[in-house]
Structures are given as C-alpha cells and as structure tokens.
Image (cartoon, rainbow, N blue to C red):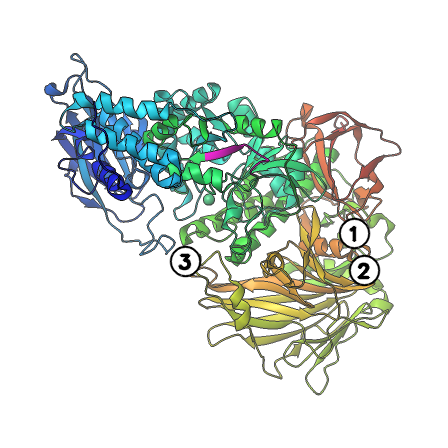
Amino acid sequence: MAAAPALKHWRTTLERVEKFVSPLYFTDCNLRGRLFGASCPVAVLSSFLTPERLPYQEAVQRDFRPAQVGDSFGPTWWTCWFRVELTIPEAWVGQEVHLCWESDGEGLVWRDGEPVQGLTKEGEKTSYVLTDRLGERDPRSLTLYVEVACNGLLGAGKGSMIAAPDPEKMFQLSRAELAVFHRDVHMLLVDLELLLGIAKGLGKDNQRSFQALYTANQMVNVCDPDQPETFPVAQALASRFFGQHGGESQHTIHATGHCHIDTAWLWPFKETVRKCARSWVTALQLMERNPEFIFACSQAQQLEWVKSRYPGLYSRLQEFACRGQFVPVGGTWVEMDGNLPSGEAMVRQFLQGQNFFLQEFGKMCSEFWLPDTFGYSAQLPQIMHGCGIRRFLSQKLSWNLVNSFPHHTFFWEGLDGSRVLVHFPPGDSYGMQGSVEEVLKTVANNRDKGRANHSAFLFGFGDGGGGPTQTMLDRLKRLSNTDGLPRVQLSSPRQLFSALESDSEQLCTWVGELFLELHNGTYTTHAQIKKGNRECERILHDVELLSSLALARSAQFLYPAAQLQHLWRLLLLNQFHDVVTGSCIQMVAEEAMCHYEDIRSHGNTLLSAAAAALCAGEPGPEGLLIVNTLPWKRTEVMALPKPGGAHSLGLTPSPGDSAQHGLCSCSSPNLAAAPAAPAACVRSARAPTDSASRPPPTKTDGSVTLDNGIIRVKLDPTGRLTSLVLVASGREAIAEGAVGNQFVLFDDVPLYWDAWDVMDYHLETRKPVLGQAGTLAVGTEGGLRGSAWFLLQISPNSRLSQEVVLDVGCPYVRFHTEVHWHEAHKFLKVEFPARVRSSQATYEIQFGHLQRPTHYNTSWDWARFEVWAHRWMDLSEHGFGLALLNDCKYGASVRGSILSLSLLRAPKAPDATADTGRHEFTYALMPHKGSFQDAGVIQAAYSLNFPLLALPAPSPAPATSWSAFSVSSPAVLLETVKQAESSPQRRSLVLRLYEAHGSHVDCWLHLSLPVQEAILCDLLERPDPAGHLTLRDSRLKLTFSPFQVLSLLLVLQPPPH
Ligand SMILES: [Zn+2]
C-alpha cells in the first residue's frame, strides 16, 4: 500500500507528477520514458519522388530507390512514396507492435492496396498499430507503402502559417522503426495527465482539486516505471477517483469527433482530396477500436471526391454511417461563405448537398454545420427551414473582435421570422483535444448557464484535417462521470440537439444577421473571384431560364440537367469559405478562376443551344434573339453586334410594345428583318424625344453635364460628381459643398490575418485621390447614350479610367471602371456624400434586405464599420433617397451621409499577388423619390446585373415576342426558373419567388406556358401535400409574408407533336 502523502506543498506535489509524465525531462527514469519498449529498424526502406498525385496502383509500379531515415525530399506539393518492408522480431510475441513514423509531410499508410491510416506529426499521429498483440503464428513480415505529401497539415507557408507557400520547401523523414508499445503505460499517462488537469483547472479553492492531486501523487508513489506489475495498483487508485460520480444537475458535454477540412485554403483543391482520405481513414480505424466513438463529417463535395478516388474507403464510410458512427452533417455541398453567395446559390448548396446525402447515406442531414465561416446571413434560418433543417451549429462568432456574443445556445430568428435552434460549442473551438482544461472551459464559458445544460464538444485536429486520436478518446471516456467535472458522453449532433430541444423553454432569441466582427476584408479581397461569382450566378440563372422555356416550347429540346449540375457544383465549390472570400493561396485562386471560365464557356454554349431551340420551327427570317431574363418589362439601350465585331446602340425593346412585359423571350421583328445590320433596325428612331439624352455640353471650365430627362449628372473637370439631380422634382442628391464619385485610398495593414481583415483604424488613414483638371472628356455625344470619361492616377503605380454613362430612359448613372492596380496594403473605395439624413442604411442580402446603423453609437454599431451587401445599398429619408448599385462588389459602408463602396484591397498573405493587375467593374448611382421599394431600386439593381441578352439565332427567330411569366406585384420577384431535379418525363419546372419589399402581399403570377398542374414545394422541391394551386386564366394567386421565399412545381403538359 502506498505511504500516506508526506508532502503538503501544492507546487512541489504538482510538479513532481508533471515530471513523472514529462516527455522532456527525466525520460530516462520517468513513466513517459517507458511508453515504448524495444525497437528495431525497418528491414528495407525505398522511395521515389513525383510531382503528381498518383493513384496507388500506379505508384506501386514505379521504380523505388533505396532510402533511409534522415532523407529529405521535396519540393512543395510533390509526393514521396515510401515502400516499407518490415520484419517483427520473434521475441516480440505477445506484445503490441507499432510502426513509428515521423515526417513533416502528411503521410498515408497503404496496406494490401487500401489506405489504412494517416500519419501526421502535427496531428499527433506518428504511430501505426501493426498488431495489438503479436500471436505466435502471425506473419511477422509485411510490406507497407507510405504516401507522403510535400506539405504540412497547414500547407507550406514561408515563415508563418498564412504566408504564401514556399515553393522550394524540403521535407524530411525523421523516424521509421518498429517498436513495442506499452498500452498500460499509456493508460496511466492519460490518467495522470487528467488528474493534473483537474488539480490545476479546479484550483486551490476546490476540495476535488486536492483529491485529484493527492491521487496522482499516490499513483507516483506506488508506480515503479521499471516494474509493470506495480501499474495495476496505480490504475486502481485512478479508477477509484474517476468512479466517484457527480450529482444529477451535472452539465452534460456531448463529445463528437470532428475534423474540419478546408476544401481549399493554404493548399490546392487536389490536396484536399488526399487530406480527406488521410483524415477519414484514421477516423474509421478509431471507430473500429471504439464502437462508441461518433464522428461528424460535413461537405458533400469532399465525400464525392473520396467516392471517386478511394472507392474502398468510401464503402467503409457508408458502412459506418449505417452503424451511426460516421455521421454526415451540414446538408450543404461545401461549408460555404455565409455572406457572399446569392440566395439561390445558398439554396443550391443545400439542394446539391441534401440530395447527395440522401442518395449516398439514405437520409438527409438534420443540422446545418458551418463552424468556420465569417458571418451568417439573416436569410439562413428561412433557407434552412426550406431544406428540412431546424438546427444550426457554428462557433465563429467567438472570434468577434469587439463584442462578446451573448449566447451559446439560442433561437435564431431570420429575416422572415423563421426560427432555428443554434448551438455554439461553448469551448469556442471545433478542434478540441479532450483535455480537462477544455472540458472546464466548456462549462465556465457557457453564456446560457441555467438555460441550457448540454454542450457540444468537437474534438479532433482541424482546418488542415487530421481529426481525433485514440488519446483524445481515452481522455474523454475516462471523464464520463466524475464528480467536480461535467458528465462527458460520446454523442452525435442529433443527440445533442434533441437534448437541447427537449429543454428549450428558457432559451433567448437573437433576431437578424449573425455578423462576425472580424474578417471584413473578405468582402473585397480577390476582386476577380468576386466578379466571377456574381457573373456565374447570372449565367446559370439565364441558362436555366432559357433551357426551361425551350423545354416548355420544344418537344425535341433536352434540358441539360447533367451539365448544369456540373456547373453549379463548380460554382458552389468556389463559394467555399476560403475561396470566394479570397483568403486562399494563389494556386487556389487560379483554380477558382478556371472553374469560372468553365462555367462561362459551357454556360454560353448552353445559352446558344436553348436559344436555337426557342427559334426552331417558328416562321420568320434569321436574326438576333433578344431575351429579357427578368420578370418585368424593360426598355434599355443595348449594344448590338454588327458584322465585323463592331457594336452599335439600340433601344430594346422600344417603348409602347405591350407584349414586352414579363419574363419574356422575344425578338424584335424589325431586328429579324435585317440581320446584317440589326442596329439600324432597332427602334432607335422611335426613341421618345422627351426623354432622350441630350448632347452633353462641355463647359469652358471642363465640366460635363449629362441629362436624360430623369436625372441630371454634373461632373467636375476631374470626373467627380458635383451634382446629381432628380429632374422631375429638382431634388439634389449630393450633399451641399461635397463631391461624389470621390476615390479614396486607405492604408490597410491588419493585425495578422492579412487577406481577411481590415481594421477600424484604417479609416483614420483616408486620403482622397485627386485628379487633374482637364482629364474629363466627352465620350458618346447624346442620342441614346451620353457619356464622359476620364483618367485618374491613383498612385505612382496604379491608375484608373472611368466612363460615366447615362442612357435614355435609365433611372441611374453608371460608372464603368477600369483599374490597373499595383499596390501593397492599400484599400481603394469610392464615396458618395448624399444630401440625405438617416440613422439607418439599407443593404441588399439574399432574398431581401436589412438595415444597419449609419452611426457609431455603441460598440455593436461601430464594430460594423465595414459591412457586406449584394447588388445595392440605399440611404433614404422620408420621400427621397440615394441608392448605390454594383455589378460585382460586396464590401460597403455608410457612415453619416456618406455611401462608400469598397473596390480593391492589396493583401500579401496568403497570396502575395492577390488583386495585382487589371480590374473592370461597374457601379451605378440612382437618386429616387419615395421609398427605394416604390422607386424600383431593387429592379434597377437586377437590370444592372442581368443585361438583356442578344443571342444569335441560327434559325428563324420567332416573329412575335412573347412573355412566359409576369408577376402582378413589384414586391414579388421571380428569381429562378429551372427544371425540377426529379420529375416524370422530365417535364416539371420549379419556380422560385420571393417578397422583396418587406411586406404582406397577394399577387398573381401570369403564366403563358402549357402548365397542367401547380403545387407549392419546399426548397428541396418536395411538394407540399396541401399545396395544390388553382390555375385560373393562366394565373396563379400567391400570398407572401415579408421576405418569404416560395417555390412552385409546375407540371407541364405533354410536349407538342
Ligand atoms: Zn475553415
């Protein structure tokens, strides 16, 4: 029996135990030094290097050359394959034998042609168990392969994690040997470390803390590292301590294994595929050894990659999913950014994701999972609801720089009033290790004490993959029910949320967006990615619409469902939270641009195919098909192609054409009549003279005035806006004595997260960019279009040119901008001081809009010094306002009366080349009377983003124009028309509409398509059993509440013959 403790000194007792388990000190005589017993080198080690990521079958055919421990290999992103031939000494019969492998590159062990375990030093996986207990008759010789990637868990940053990767980095194999592993020593070490954690964590005011310390001290007394027969006595002391249970009110921690794998970030997409294999095969191995271990895995895209690249591993994942140990979560294609994707794109994240999970794992996910995203749109609760999800897990708001978010468990009420149950693991991490410190933090940090008695605890290395370890599991299992600590159970997210739901009466509610007070630079960084995102969202919208119309009108047309799914998945992939945000390395940005290029080129091919089908069989000469893909009448000036590649302007369609309203596919008969010179035939001659743009007079002082009868724009000789008048009312929109279209440059040096963060203090470095008088020149001299242009030197290295354009009939003035940008840590914005006073500005978000303050009263107000918006923002007072529209920007702010659009940043990490080069973008300014809703700001922003299409019609275009859809209320927008994912004979369409004004509305949807049946459905296109709608006179009556999104299934009549 152990002697009674003689020591009464806290510190010496504690440190004595620490030294007994230390991996650094006294390993010659302490317990840690006995973790491994005998060792021997591997029999033969050989390797080869390749720049490619080869499949196993191909790799093992290659020429392996002799290799040895200490060898270095590289460079970055290459792969070194090792063949490891080993023979276990006969003397080790009865022992647990490991292959000990240490390398700074991420490794994957292959055995008998299948991946079996990841080996990653940074992920504390340096040991592969060859046998739990070597039997007398077990084969002792074996050949393994280890595929080592030339990158670490977090890429290969030069000097710091987020620095651009070092292309020349070399990696090393520092250990490869066989060793006997002492499991009993390991378990004692786990216990002693937990006891130390309890002693330290509970502190000197707590009796249980001393009990833990003295238990550990006694264990050291009885335990002789050289005599394993002493271990059971020590183990018994620990068991007695951990077996002393807590009371009924104990908090319960639900520990779920997890491995956050960024789909691309500091490494390319292709490496992520291997990260998934390394991480998940390791998790599977843990599931086999620990039947109670549950692992949550998100992101359908990653599973799809593993399915195609590692089919054997994938079928085992499916097996463990059936057992309930491998739990798909999230419901989305990737863990997308929560701010920038359009509403429709967010719906598609779930549509692609949930359908994948259903098809591959037999059920959809019941919780949305986005632990690492930079803010969460107020529209997400409604989107979740529509996709069969009522629960949401995240934790990123713990990164708030200014305000501490007041909840960990709460109801989140979205823009339309939809509510979901949200849980943020109170330990503020998704990469826990199972330590006592983390367990105690989970309880202490919980902001909903007394309201929620259950918490999530996500354990496993994350970001770069890695995942849980056996040691983490051993810790958590030991802590299942110990007095002084919360109860710990290995649980699924479903169990956690069920427990939270069953006791949710006391929970508070948070209304509106979950704004992350950090990473606000991600709305702007990598402008080309942002532009690709907006443009490709438009292209897919237009392709789906035209293809749907072609499907309805043509018996022969085949809806390109498979191609569209492929293109959508590329777009969704790019919306990953480190890609569309611009916080990725150069290599990823280049891959993302290739994805956009694919969508553009294939999308244009699909548009042409649909146009051809729409023209087929109609009488009339060949020409151009003019298509308006928006559900309201438009009369706009268009640049129409002329032979030889030139363009000329046309007003399309001409005013007064009653047929031109609605979502219409139309071709002007005049156009079609003279295909060689279409522009000449556009009804420009009929442009009403009262609203024509008058020739822009250039005054002697060098200023230019543009006037189209709706607005009058006055530019000073350097291109700044000195006046913007709403002609009918004479109302001036620019603040007195101020100038708009003022470019401003800021120093942009964050504290650490370069591509991510713009800090509040950047506002103190504001420098207006001043142009030179005389640079302003008249562009187009009136007629259908008036324009002026100018050059502006931003800095010695960067310059800008801009064309300011005002069209006939257009309620806004456009600013086409080209920038050659060669800066470091600068931020370019453009400002418009408005003659408007309001404490709130309005910003467009997914399927709606919201208000944010224009002042810095409280910390919650000023923390939003840089916010995100989609296509428009507006500052209105009673009766008048000024809206700022854009075609590819997301960063914005309104402070006081100044509307400011964020244009370009120049961060250097993790991509040193980010945003360097040429940029093109357009923003527009729209003064309006009344509210922005009544003034049509929303429609104007759509028009700017969805130009009329002029598609070459290879066969005769329809002689008369027609409209497929229109909606009777301007408050209701028809956002999407597509083929239903699954429909009999493929003749069902899905329409998605939303209420955009923030009002209760009854409206009529007019349809001119051959519709047989109309049924309300959810966002996953599942019909609502009570949702049959009556079709009367080709109209459907629809009722909306504010910001409600409605989806309809339209069953088309059989095709015409
Ligand atoms: Zn992440």
- The answer to which of marks 2 and 1 sits earlier in the sequence is 1
Query: Residue 175 sits in which quadrant?
Result: top left
- The answer to which of marks 3 and 2 sits earlier in the sequence is 2
Q: Residues within 10 Å of mark 2 (few under 14, many from 20)?
A: some
- The answer to which of marks 3 and 1 sits earlier in the sequence is 1
Amino acid type at mark 1: Ser
Question: Which residue: 58% across, 30% down?
Answer: 500
Q: Residue 263: x, y in percent? A: 45, 42
- Disc 3 + disc 1, Cβ < 8 Å: no
Which label is found at residue 668?
A: 1
Question: Which residue: 45% across, 28% down?
Answer: 487
- Disc 2 + disc 1, Cβ < 8 Å: yes
When the figure is inspected, residue 975 is found, relative to residue 223, above or below; the finding is below
Q: Which residue is mark 2?
A: 683
Q: Residue furthest right?
A: 1033
Q: Residues within 10 Å of mark 3 (few under 14, many from 20)?
A: many
Question: What stretch of residues is rendered in magenta?
Answer: 449-457
Q: Quadrant of the C terminus?
A: top right
Which label is found at residue 909?
A: 3
Amino acid type at mark 3: Ala
